[in-house]
Image: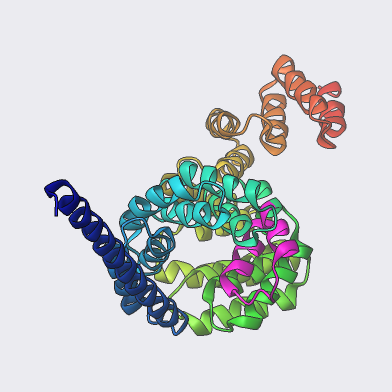
Amino acid sequence: MKASHFYRVKTTAVIILLFLLQAVAAQDAKTLYDEGVKLKNEGKTKEAMEKFRLALYQKSDYTEAQYEWAWCQNDLKDYTGAITNLRTVRKSWSNVAKVYFELGYAFEKTGQPDSALQSYGECLRLNPAYSLAYKQSGYIFFIKADYKTAIEHFGKYEANAKNEIRDYFYWYRKGFALNALLDYSNAIVALKNSLTYKTDYFNTYLESGFAANKLKQAEEAISYYKKAMELDPKSHIPYNGIGEVYRDTKKDMNEAMVWYQKTLVINATERKACFGMGYCLNSLGKYSGAADYLTTAVQQEPTYTAAFVELGYSLYMLTKYTEAIEQLNKALSLNPKNENAKYYSGLVYIRQGNKTMAQKMVDELKGLNSKNAATLQSKVEAM
């Protein structure tokens, strides 16, 4: 046999052997992959991940195994590892929506919201019915306090969800966002859904109490707050909530103060309770006591616009006009469109005989279409 022929035969045999070894390895990789899928479906994520990792070791370009490995990493909160794997998967599966969802989720959990939104957006471009991408995008906008956009995404999540949404935390967040948007009726609906799936989540009762009070449903609001008290007897927040019900809805200032005092037993300088006490005392004509509480409120929160307004009113009624204007100006520096601050400032200027500044407040109230403008205008004309 010629040497050249011998080497050709030997080379062919090596190629066949390598092909057979690769086939066996691929078969072993597929077996490992299938075992991993089975374990994943059984909820054994850690064991499944090891199978996918071994499958990828056997077959380095096994994209399916690498994606499942990354999925398991997300599930086990190894988000950095998931990002590394998913970036590799993305090169082969650039048109697969679920890759971008998992990548977005990993970005979200590693504090990269903009990258997460970009990935979720790509997921939805590839599959506009990918409901969870809407949900997670909504969560990011919720954290950003962009509640309007969050609600838009939540609506699309619900429209595309294939199964009943039983996630109490989702419904809580939707209710919170709707409260922030002053949509109290729909907030109550969402919060009741939250309570359907979890009856002992403290914050849901707080938001429910807040929404019910805004809807003038006083007894329902009190009931929600009392349930919150049962869940966390040490929290002062439900006491403040009931105080607001009596103050704003029932107009019973004395009973409101009973509840604010319960908060102040826990924390003598708690800002909302101090504001509530000051507001109630102002309403009862006890301006000196009101000023003391309101001073504490603004000390605790130097950006508390409503407290500066009430403090300005207390000082006006105590004939401390210079100090009153100082506090009302602080309120206006925080919120230049605050109607009460402008109205009370006008009253102070009238008492000081400063018709020019009083008229300026009237004109600014007119610019805001305030119902107080006409009342103040008549007082200025009577100077």
For the residue pair 42 and 175, the one nearer the viewer reads as: 42
Q: Position of residue 292 (x, y in %)?
A: 48, 50
User: In screen coordinates, is 292 left or right of 324?
Assistant: left
Q: Quadrant of residue 209?
A: bottom right
The residue located at (75%, 70%) in the rendering is: 189
**162 within the magenta span:** yes
The answer to whether residue 338 is above or below residue 216 is above
**154 within the magenta span:** yes
For the residue pair 251 and 369, the one nearer the viewer reads as: 369
The answer to whether residue 222 is visible is yes
The residue located at (16%, 51%) in the rendering is: 7
The residue located at (35%, 54%) in the rendering is: 85
Q: Which residues are magenta?
A: 153-178
Prevailing secondary structure of the magenta residues: helix
Q: Quadrant of residue 184?
A: bottom right
User: In screen coordinates, is 125 left or right of 297?
Assistant: right
Quadrant into which the C terminus falls: top right
The outermost residue toward the top is 356
Quadrant into which the N terminus falls: bottom left
Q: Position of residue 335 (x, y in %)?
A: 61, 33
User: In screen coordinates, is 202 left or right of 64?
Assistant: right
